[in-house]
Image (tube, grey):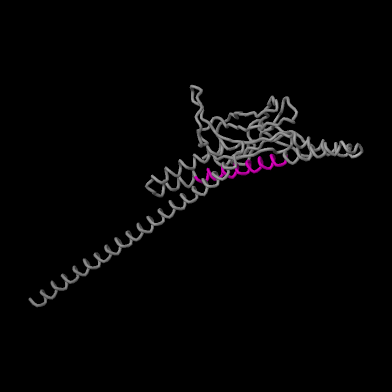
Amino acid sequence: MENQKSSSSLKAVIAVLAILLVGSLVYIFKMSSDADTSKVEMTNTITEKESVMKDLQELKTTYDAAIAENTSMSDELIQERDKVVNLMSQLSKSKGDVASLSKYRTQFNSLQANMKVLMTENENLKLANTTLTTQRDSTVVVLGESRKNVEALTGQNEELSKAVEMGSKLTVLNTRGSAFKVRSSGKQIETDKARRADVLRVSFTIAENVIAKSGNKSFYVQVIDGKNNVIGDKKTENFDDDILTYSFITNVNYDNKTVQVTEDLKGKDFVKGTYFINIFDKGQLVSKTSFILR
């Protein structure tokens, strides 16, 4: 009888030890898995931080090259380059957690979008300058030949008129869109959040052109929101077979010198998304840009 009790007690002890052993193995396995997961997450975080830093460095290199060309857009390019440098400094000092890296990646995407727009405008400016130089040289040749041959002068004058007409078109540069919160005091604070915005600001530069006709110039401004809707006045204008729906018209007294134009479009309940701004000289699109409201 005593042997049976002793055997039962021994079995009970063995069972308890077995349970404790299994529990210990499960705990050790969980701790090992958690450690491996943390190691993978840390590795991924470091890799993403290096990736964002590399993308920012490439963005800076692109701006450095464009600034070195010393065009009339150099000041704006320098401002955007400085934003990239500032973000690189912030990223370098950051702890590199997932939330902050996501914020830096979003800011990089916004800076990259601005860079693409500015690079396009810079290329257009260089092309316009090349075209004007070519036209000027062609005009000199035409005038020289006209002294030799009166008959050829008529045909050359027609070509010259076409060149002057092309060269007299106004060039619109540095188009930019942004949003502002208007405080009760009237002070305006720039924001990138749709729910805080009270005003959308559109600004652009009309380049100097000594052969263009001076006087009052009208530009049609089209603002398209994140849902692909034209906002503002939403009026229409016919240009030959085309119908333009625009947000507002801006009038400029142009005297052949560079003019900075800034217009505000008031509104409320702006939607989130990418906003597109198109500037038209009559029915011709002369400049465009975009910006994002979160």
Q: Which residues are magenta?
A: 108-131
Residue appearing at x 69%, y 38% in the figure? 286
Residue 218 is left or right of residue 153, and the answer is left
* Magenta run includes residue 161: no
Name the residue furthest front.
Answer: 148
Nearest the camera: 95 or 16? 95
**The N terminus lies in quadrant:** bottom left
Residue that sits furthest to the right in the current view: 151
Vertical order, 149 against 38 (above or below): above
Q: Is residue 168 left or right of residue 56?
A: right
Query: Which one is in front, 138 or 15?
Result: 138
| Residue at 35% over, 58% down | 39
The magenta stretch spans residue 119: yes
Residue 3 image position (x, y, % from top left): 9, 77
Q: Residue at horizontal 45%, vertical 40%?
A: 86
Q: Position of residue 209 (x, y in %)?
A: 70, 31
**Secondary structure mostly taken by the magenta-highlighted segment of the chain:** helix
Please tell me whether residue 128 is drawn above or below residue 1 in the rendered image: above
- Residue located farthest toward the top when viewing the structure as drawn: 185
